[in-house]
């Protein structure tokens, strides 16, 4: 067994979109570090068969939890650089329940529940996202 430790990058970035860095991927788990500039968000997502979480490392933001209803196929797509698909029209989700988060906060989302993260602070937000493997092979993003 190979043990691995990874330093989470916290250097400021000025990208026009959130910056994601893969930290780990296995048949059972995946972990990524996200850096969001003020106002940026991680779009609402849902993994049908996988629990997910964010650990806030730096900054302040808002964890958003939407309804648990699976989207219609016409309003959902699999976002990936490996699939150069034209995304179908997205449908809006209902207003989310919102929770303020800061460094040290752990945000948990059970499988089948839409969730997202927004940087509402004035500085960069850094979060580690951890998701169990989803045997359905689908991650729904609708926003």
Image (cartoon, rainbow, N blue to C red):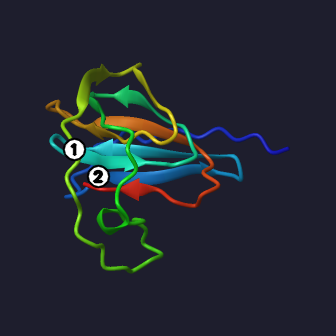
Q: Quadrant of residue 123?
A: top left
Residue 86 disc label: none
Q: Quadrant of residue 127?
A: top left
> Could you say whether the residue bearing mark 1 is in a helix, strand or loop?
loop
Badge 2: residue crowd in 10 Å (few <14, some 14–19, many ≥20): some
- What whole-number distance in Å separates the C-alpha atoms at marks 2 and 1? 7 Å
> Could you say whether the residue bearing mark 2 is in a helix, strand or loop?
loop
Kindly identify the residue that appears in the image at 69 percent across and 52 percent down: 26
Badge 1: residue crowd in 10 Å (few <14, some 14–19, many ≥20): many
- Residue 3 located left or right of residue 99: right
Q: Quadrant of residue 78?
A: bottom left
In the image, residue 96 above or below residue 44: above
- Mark earlier in primary sequence (2, 1): 2
Q: Are marks 2 and 1 in contact (CB under 8 Å)?
A: yes
Q: Which of 137 and 74 lies nearest the eye of the viewer? A: 74
Q: Which of 13 and 87 lies nearest the eye of the viewer? A: 87
Percent coordinates x, y for residue 86 in the rendering? 30, 79
Q: Which of 45 and 31 lies nearest the eye of the viewer? A: 45
Q: Which quadrant is the N terminus positioned in?
A: top right
Kindly identify the residue that appears in the image at 25 percent across and 45 percent down: 41
In the image, residue 87 above or below residue 75: below
Percent coordinates x, y for residue 129 in the rendering? 47, 40
Percent coordinates x, y for residue 76 in the rendering? 35, 62
Kindly identify the residue that appears in the image at 24 percent across and 57 percent down: 17
Q: Which quadrant is the C terminus positioned in?
A: bottom left
Kindly identify the residue that appears in the image at 52 percent across and 53 percent down: 22
- Residue 97 located left or right of residue 115: left
The residue indicated by pointer 1 is: 37
The residue indicated by pointer 2 is: 18
> Total of numbered circles in the picture?
2
């Amino acid at each position: 067994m190979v043990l691995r430790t990874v330093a989470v990058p916290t250097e400021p970035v000025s990208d026009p979109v959130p910056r994601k860095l893969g930290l780990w991927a296995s048949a059972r788990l995946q972990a990524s570090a996200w850096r969001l500039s003020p106002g940026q968000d991680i779009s609402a997502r849902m993994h049908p068969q996988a629990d997910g979480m964010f650990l806030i490392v730096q900054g302040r933001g808002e964890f958003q939890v939407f309804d648990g209803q699976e989207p219609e196929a016409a309003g959902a797509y699999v976002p990936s650089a490996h699939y150069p698909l034209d995304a179908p029209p997205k449908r809006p989700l209902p207003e989310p329940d919102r929770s303020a988060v800061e460094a040290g906060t752990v945000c948990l989302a059970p499988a089948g529940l839409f969730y997202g993260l927004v940087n509402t602070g004035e500085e960069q937000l850094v979060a580690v996202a951890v998701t169990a493997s989803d045997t359905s092979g689908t991650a729904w993003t609708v926003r």
